Amino acid sequence: MAIFIYFITFMIAALAIFYILGYGYLFNGISKTYLRGKMSANIDDGKLFSANTIATKSPVPWEKDPQYNKKELPDTIAGDLIRSETASFIVIKDGKMLHEQYWKGYHALSATNSFSMAKAITVMLLGKALEDGKIRSLDDKFSDYFEDFKNKDFARNLTLKHLAQMESGLDWDEDYKNPFLPNARAYYGRSLMKATFSRKFKSDPGEKFEYQSGSTQLLGFAVRKAVGQSLAGYLSEKFWIPLGMEQDATWSTDESGMEKTYCCIHSNARDFAKLGQLFLNNGKVGHQQLLSPYFIEQMKTPTKRSGEIYGMGFWVNNDNPVKHYYFLGLQGQYIIMVPEYNMVIVRTGSYNNLPKTDRGRPDQVKFLVNETVKLFSGNE
């Protein structure tokens, strides 16, 4: 009996220490992963978190190409997709759906986690807020929105552009496996403000490219404050409804209702493809200009400090024979735009062993671009 009492006392003390040290979120993480048979965050975990709805109003289904699903994927592409535990694979050409395929029980309206594809969507909202006059300039200082940052070392000159281009100088280790590092705290914790505003800065903004979820989360705070409404509501009004998305999406939030702007928009592959088509159409849907072509050009222009691989929210591959740029999310979520062939490629799934030897970019993206273009452009 005494041993049992000692054990319970020890466990209570250990729990108290974890909470005091700020690691209470770990228990939330364990309940949402290991206790559900998962080893990490996954594309189906949207229902486990609080969320804001990204509403649509008048769905407009994709027009199907006359050759829709008439060409079977060769073993090279199909084998790669199956090995990488793909959920969906969609090809849009000339604004029409040319190929659509699902695996592992997923289907056309399966909503899965965007993960970091949401970073580019957050930058889209920044661009729209600029157009709407809610934000004056990309060179606005973050401290214009949150005055306390004037007193943080290195942060007083931090601009919205620095955050969008991943040149903030924030002290943030972009590690997806270590539960004690910032990404896990932001993903499973109760307060995004505590997770991000507590971080220090290690260098002057604009000195170095460093891909960080924390930078996009800070950007999200500024945009939300500027627009004066939830980002899910703003996204719905400015993009989801005008694009005729097929179904409502959700955007995971913390306990205060703040969206996780570095990740976590849960939608289906068809609607993700509409975002890609918007960029191929230079920001237009029908006769309506939803996003400035000038801002789009800034998003897809790679910066020198990134080594010419990242713009604002978009990863870019202009050194491939078939140039492309893309939304990229953890475990292989892609919306790929291939301007030369007027093509959008969407792939979603759960692949934890994604090789990134192409200067920090996933090898699979380049492979899918080259093979898909070869298959569907008549260049076989």
Image (cartoon, rainbow, N blue to C red):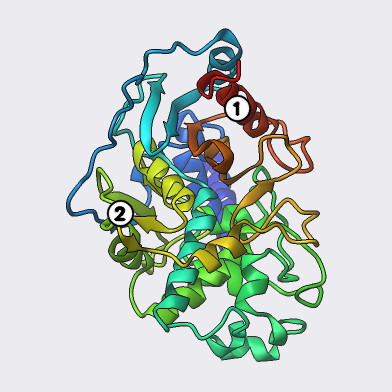
Q: CA distance from mark 1 to mark 2?
A: 29 Å
Q: Specify few, some or many for label 1: CA neighbours under 10 Å numbering under 14, 14-19, or 20 or more.
A: some
* Residue behind mark 1: 368
Q: Specify few, some or many for label 2: CA neighbours under 10 Å numbering under 14, 14-19, or 20 or more.
A: few
Left or right placement of residue 206 versus residue 315 in this view: right
Mark 1 vs mark 2, foreground winner is 2
Where's residue 135, x and y in %? 48, 82
Circle number at residue 152? none
The amino acid sitting under disc 2 is: Gly
Q: Which residue is found at the position 59% from the left and 52% from the top?
A: 184
What secondary structure is marked by label 2?
A: loop
Circle number at residue 286? 2
What secondary structure is marked by label 1?
A: helix
Q: Nearer the viewer, residue 189 or 301?
A: 301
Q: With respect to residue 7, does 291 lie above or below? A: below
Where's residue 42, x and y in %? 49, 37
Q: With respect to residue 310, does 33 lie above or below? A: above
The amino acid sitting under disc 1 is: Leu
